């Protein structure tokens, strides 16, 4: 061994010993944190507050504080992911959270559920969005993660319809960057005769399909993961799906990032049986109806501007009980317990023929 090689190994050995020492310290600190988390559960149980071990506002505050403390070189996304997994593992010591989502495994909904609750959660894939709601309403699952809108294709109608009648509350949101891939066992685009995917994903890749696979049949199925399952077993077939489906069903990526819009993003909401407390950076969602007369909607929206409350979303949806009547889904900044929001909601309740608060919850930070 040359002198230069010996010097290299010596220097590396010093740094590696330091890393090993830090790893041991990290392990002890992580276990110490877990013990403190267990103490929190024990204290809450003694005081009769053991109903909900997951507190979305507390997690949001922890992640916000961690990002503010982060000085690098790790990115805020990396440290947020790490601490989300730490909190997920600590919660599982008390009871793994059951999280229902639109399945099967390998969907973007699974990715959103894992992003929000971590890998220690008990994932419960369902066959339809209706089943996702029912799993939590019946008490079989603790929380639901459902898509509510896509940046290019708009609102998810079935989710909005079910929010009108469910007793569940929105207690969180997840924003997921959507990358669509063409997955297939075939070796070239020329061999692909049929493309399976969810209708939303087919629409998000419409122009790419027109250019690259103009003659291929497009078949809409219940989910992207189901599309991947079909593509595994069928000659000449491909699926449009995400990375999770590619890995789960061992399908090669024949083409990557084929979505028409480079900033394609889907927003999911987290549904549970409890309210989320104020976190300091919150959003409130509601649904209301307006009288069928000139200026009715503007009168309903006036309390928000009068109270200085910003509205971030307004979506109309046909009312299912009356022909040609509409309800309006609204997102505003702030928590329902904030003074300005509380005043605006009180005035809105006096003006709206129908008003339902869907929930206040921490705004997604990443």
Image (cartoon, rainbow, N blue to C red):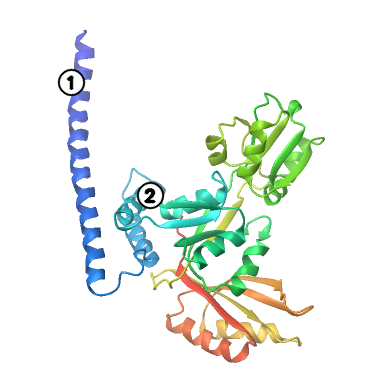
| Quarter occupied by residue 237 | top right
Closer to the chain start, of discs 1 and 2, is 1
- The number of numbered badges drawn on the structure is 2
Decide: is 163 above or below 151.
below
Task: Count neighbours of disc 1 (C-alpha within 10 A) and say few if under 14, some if 14 to 19, many if 20 or more.
Answer: few
Q: Which residue is mark 2?
A: 120
Task: Count neighbours of disc 2 (C-alpha within 10 A) and say few if under 14, some if 14 to 19, many if 20 or more.
Answer: many
- Percent across and percent down for residue 294 are 76, 87
Along the viewing direction, whichever of 213 and 300 lies nearer the viewer: 213
Give the structural element (helix, strand or loop) at label 1.
Answer: helix
Q: CA distance from mark 1 to mark 2?
A: 39 Å
- Is 316 left, or right, of 53 in this rendering? right
Along the viewing direction, whichever of 5 and 187 lies nearer the viewer: 187
Which part of the image, by quadrant, shows the N terminus?
top left
- Percent across and percent down for residue 311 are 57, 74
Give the structural element (helix, strand or loop) at label 2.
Answer: loop
- Residue 148 in sight from this viewpoint: no
Report the residue at 51% width, 68% height from top.
137
| Quarter occupied by residue 303 | bottom right
Decide: is 224 above or below 175.
above
Report the residue at 17% width, 27% height from top.
14
Q: Which residue is mark 1?
A: 10
- Is 76 left, or right, of 271 in this rendering? left
- Percent across and percent down for residue 55 are 36, 66
Q: Which mark is residue 35?
A: none
Report the residue at 74% width, 26% height from top.
191
- Of tags 1 and 2, the one toward the viewer is 2
Decide: is 197 above or below 45.
above
Q: Are marks 1 and 2 in contact (CB under 8 Å)?
A: no
Decide: is 110 above or below 315.
above
- Residue 86 in sight from this viewpoint: yes
């Amino acid at each position: 061994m040359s002198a230069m090689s010996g010097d290299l190994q010596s220097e590396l050995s010093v740094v590696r010993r330091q890393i090993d020492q830090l790893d041991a310290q990290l392990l002890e600190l992580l276990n110490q944190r877990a013990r403190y988390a267990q103490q929190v559960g024990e204290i809450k149980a003694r005081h009769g507050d053991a109903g909900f071990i997951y507190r979305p506002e507390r997690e949001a505050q922890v992640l916000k504080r961690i990002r503010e403390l982060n000085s690098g070189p790790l990115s805020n996304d990396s440290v947020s992911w790490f601490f989300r997994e730490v909190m997920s593992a600590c919660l599982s010591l008390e009871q793994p959270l059951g999280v229902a989502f639109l399945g099967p495994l390998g969907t973007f909904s699974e990715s959103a559920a894992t992003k929000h609750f971590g890998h220690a959660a008990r994932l419960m894939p369902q066959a339809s969005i209706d089943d996702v709601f029912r799993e939590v309403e019946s008490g079989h699952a603790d929380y639901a993660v459902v898509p509510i809108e896509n940046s290019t294709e708009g609102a998810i109608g079935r989710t909005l319809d079910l929010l009108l009648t469910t007793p569940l509350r929105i207690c969180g949101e997840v924003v997921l960057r959507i990358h669509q891939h063409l997955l297939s066992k075939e070796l070239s685009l020329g061999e692909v005769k049929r493309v399976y995917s969810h209708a939303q994903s087919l629409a998000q890749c419409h122009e790419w399909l027109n250019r690259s696979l103009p003659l291929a049949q497009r078949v809409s199925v219940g989910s992207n993961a189901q599309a991947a399952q079909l593509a595994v077993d069928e000659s000449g077939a491909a699926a449009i799906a995400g990375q999770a489906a590619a890995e789960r069903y061992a399908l090669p990526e024949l083409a990557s990032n084929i979505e028409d819009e480079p900033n394609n993003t889907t927003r999911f909401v987290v549904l549970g049986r409890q309210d989320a407390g104020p976190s300091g950076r919150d959003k409130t969602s509601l649904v209301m109806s307006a009288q069928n007369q000139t200026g009715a909607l503007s009168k309903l929206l006036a309390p928000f501007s009068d109270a200085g409350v910003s509205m971030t979303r307004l979506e109309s949806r046909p009312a299912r009980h009356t022909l040609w009547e509409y309800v309006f889904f609204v997102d505003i900044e702030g928590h329902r317990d904030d003074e300005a929001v509380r005043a605006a909601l009180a005035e809105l309740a006096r003006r709206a023929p129908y008003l339902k608060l869907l929930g206040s919850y921490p705004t997604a930070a990443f």
